[in-house]
Amino acid sequence: MARSVQTHGGAAHGSVKEYVWGLFWSVVLTAIPFAVVMIGGFDGRLTLAIILLCAVAQIFVQLVFFLHMNTSSEQAWNTVSAVFIVLIVAIVVLGSIWIMNHLNHNMLMGH
Amino acid sequence: MATQMIAPEPGYTGFVAEEHHHDYAGDTLLGFWIYIMSDCILFATLFATYAVLGNSFAGGLTPKDLFDLNFVAVETGLLLLSSFTFGMAMLGAQHKNMTQLLLWLGFTFSLGGGFLAMELYEFYHFSHEGAGPTTSAYWSAFYALVGTHGLHVFAGMFWMVFLVIHLLKDGITEANFTRLSCLSLFWHFLDIIWICVFSMVYLMGVM
């Protein structure tokens, strides 16, 4: 089935090569955290760091290889809105965790 | 930067548009991108809820009792591969190759269906084992987060069916290509959300 795909390069929005690389890196960055957790025995903090690093790396891989984000002026608004949303998401998620943990602590329900 | 604008041409709107693109397609895609960004906020609230309620098991079952990472790895593989096959479908559309487009869309649809079937089986299995949405705050948050992602996948598959009907009726027209590009953004976005789900829910749940 892969043989029916013929590229002649120069495609504006991606190429077979780009998608194959995207898939390759996604598989690698998925396999690493799964393997680390499934094998087990690693330090908890190290495991957490590996999971988070691989997740963030894979998000970037998918944004670049699959969603074709770049820094061209054509995409400036996409990038600006994405950066804005990352900020909002960070405030919502980190802010909630922070506040609710303190709340639990003050209610003497923390572990 | 090198462009020197001395006096604006009549009709100059300030937008820099590529010659071979209609303006409206770019606007539609940007609009759809904004929708996806707002969807990110929806998922952010669900992730925040999940994180806050992450230890509230009410003395019941915990994710360590139930999660099976092999199962989740296969699920993840299906969704990841479907992102790739959608990319190949997009290439087919760019080359105006209807057979290639429909073939890869078919693969994408099947992979999405497989993913959804596995997720529903998992929900059924967990509920059967005694961890339903009403069991504890943790499981409520779990079903809300993972279920919302599943609903999005279902919506994407629904959309795909209608897009194929459009494609069979009108061929790869400019309008259909714009629709396909929007669905492509949506499908890849769901894959990105799933990365967060398997990392935060499944991997951190059993470590």
Image (spheres, rainbow, N blue to C red):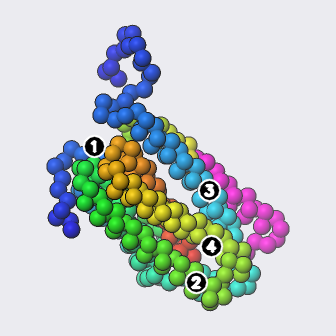
Callout 3: 10 Å neighbours few (<14), some, many (20+)?
Answer: some
Distance (Cα) linking label 4 and label 3: 15 Å
> Residue B115, how many percent across, how many down?
45, 73
**Secondary structure category for the residue under label 4:** helix
Distance (Cα) linking label 4 and label 1: 40 Å
Q: Which residue is mark 2?
A: B124
Whether discs 3 and 2 lie on one chain: the answer is yes
Q: Which mark is residue B42?
A: 3
The single residue placed furthest to the front in the displayed view is B169
Q: Which residue is mark 4?
A: B143
Q: Which mark is residue A12?
A: 1
Tell me the amino acid under the disc marked 3: Leu
Q: Is residue A82 visible?
A: no
Q: Which residues are magenta?
A: A87-111
Q: Residue at x 52, y 82 (%)?
A: B121
Tell me the amino acid under the disc marked 4: Tyr
Q: Are marks 4 and 1 in contact (CB under 8 Å)?
A: no
- Give the main secondary structure, helix, strand or loop, of the magenta stretch: helix
Which quadrant of the figure has residue B44? bottom right
Tell me the amino acid under the disc marked 2: Tyr
